[in-house]
Image: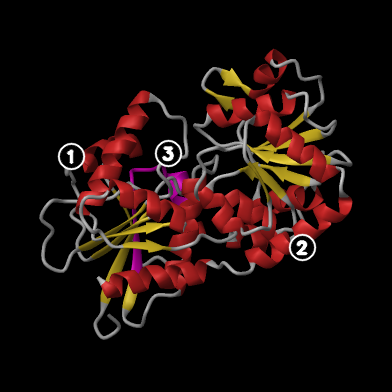
Amino acid sequence: MTDAAGRLTVVLDEVAERSRTMVGRYSAEMARALVATAPEGFEVAGISAKISESREARARALLPGLAELKQTAVSARELREAWLHTITTIPIHGFVHATSLLAPLVREPDPGDQVTVTVHGLQALSDRAERKQRWFDRALRRALARAHGIVVPSTAVAEDLALLADDECPVRVVHPAPSAALLAAASTPPARELPLPDEYVLALTQPNDRGQAERLVETIASPQMPDVRVVVAGPVEWGEARLAGLAVEAGLPAGRLVMLGDLSDADLAVAHRRALAHLHVAEHDALGLSLLDAAALGTATVHPATRSLEEIAGDASVSVPGDVHELAAALGRLLADDDARARIALHAQDRARAFTWEAAARQVWALHADL
């Protein structure tokens, strides 16, 4: 693989959006690491759906080492449908690594073409609307049938995929890592003073995931929830739904939620480090990026017990089986035990050091070499 000049084209999904998603953060971190670890004689290019000039500028700033950044002729929504039906206006040949299920897969690839696809989990990291559900299910089946290799974040996801796959598509477990951009920004003084309470729990929301916001409010409204303020970083609106409205409907007292909106990496790092704990309520998250970010910054996380998150966290978090009431009760027990919270936070930092994006990228390069 290192003997001849070549190119790896990385499919950038949701990168440089104003409100960052977990998929977008993963895509940017992996692409940056692939550039940094490219074997001698290889370059890394990027391809994305059609985006605005301002977003392109942000993408180029995020990924300065790309040899080229191409755009398709259509937007992301149209591109998802086009690639699902093998329609493309830009032929992509050679090695391709898709950082999600958005991938240019064909039934009969040309000689030398090789496409690997990333499956973050068997549930989409967004609201499961009927249209999105259909696309996700079809894209997953297509990846299992046509991809040359599949990257997954945990052995748990690999085992789940094995139950769905008829053919033996090579699957490589590549654990994600804490955000390198977030850790770099953590050493930079924030540009402003955040309106943070003296004591609080941190929770993150995601674009296109009203369901996660509803579950967060249900958790905070539980009778088992400790009397602590909750700082929310991330979007606060999903269509006509607003986090403030959901809180009022649930009967949360005024001031219980401190809604900061989308934060820069420097501000988010401050919010993590000052928090008593990180409350992660997403039931279908198999990727664990926010858990790893919190761990790297010394914040203990309370989260639903899933095989994938438990594998990524090791025993350096509070994994909770059960419903939102169990989640709230576990948070209460953690906040009542200062020694346990400090011990988990230190252990989490050690655990987070075991994962780097450079190591993850080298595994992707090795997968292409092995295929």
Q: Is residue 56 magenta?
A: yes
Q: Are marks 1 and 2 in contact (CB under 8 Å)?
A: no
Q: Earlier in the sequence, mark 1 or mark 3?
A: 1
Q: Which sits in the foreground, 72 or 145?
A: 145
Judging by the rendered image, the residue that carries numbered circle 2 is: 346
Q: Which range of residues does the magenta coloring cover?
A: 44-57
Q: Residue 186's image quarter?
A: bottom right
Q: Is residue 313 magenta?
A: no
- Is residue 75 visible from the viewing direction of this image? no
Q: Residue at x 46, y 46 (%)?
A: 55
Judging by the rendered image, the residue that carries numbered circle 3 is: 124
Q: Residue at x 24, y 55 (%)?
A: 147
Question: Where residue 198 sits: x, y (%)?
Answer: 89, 41
Question: Where residue 41 sits: x, y (%)?
Answer: 31, 81
Give the label, 1 or 2, closer to the camera: 2
The amino acid pointed to by label 1 is: His
Q: Are marks 1 and 3 in contact (CB under 8 Å)?
A: no
The amino acid pointed to by label 3 is: Ala
Q: Is 166 on the left-hand or right-hand side of 32?
A: left
Which residue is outermost to the bottom?
3
Q: Residue 136's image quarter?
A: top left
Measured in 3D between alpha carbons, the distance from the residue under mark 3 to the one under mark 2, in whole angstroms, is: 31 Å
Q: Residue 142's image quarter?
A: top left
Judging by the rendered image, the residue that carries numbered circle 1 is: 85
Crowding near the residue tagged with mark 1, few <14, some 14–19, many ≥20 C-alpha atoms within 10 Å? some
Q: Residue at x 39, y 55 (%)?
A: 158
Q: Are marks 3 and 2 in contact (CB under 8 Å)?
A: no
Measured in 3D between alpha carbons, the distance from the residue under mark 1 to the one under mark 2, in whole angstroms, is: 48 Å
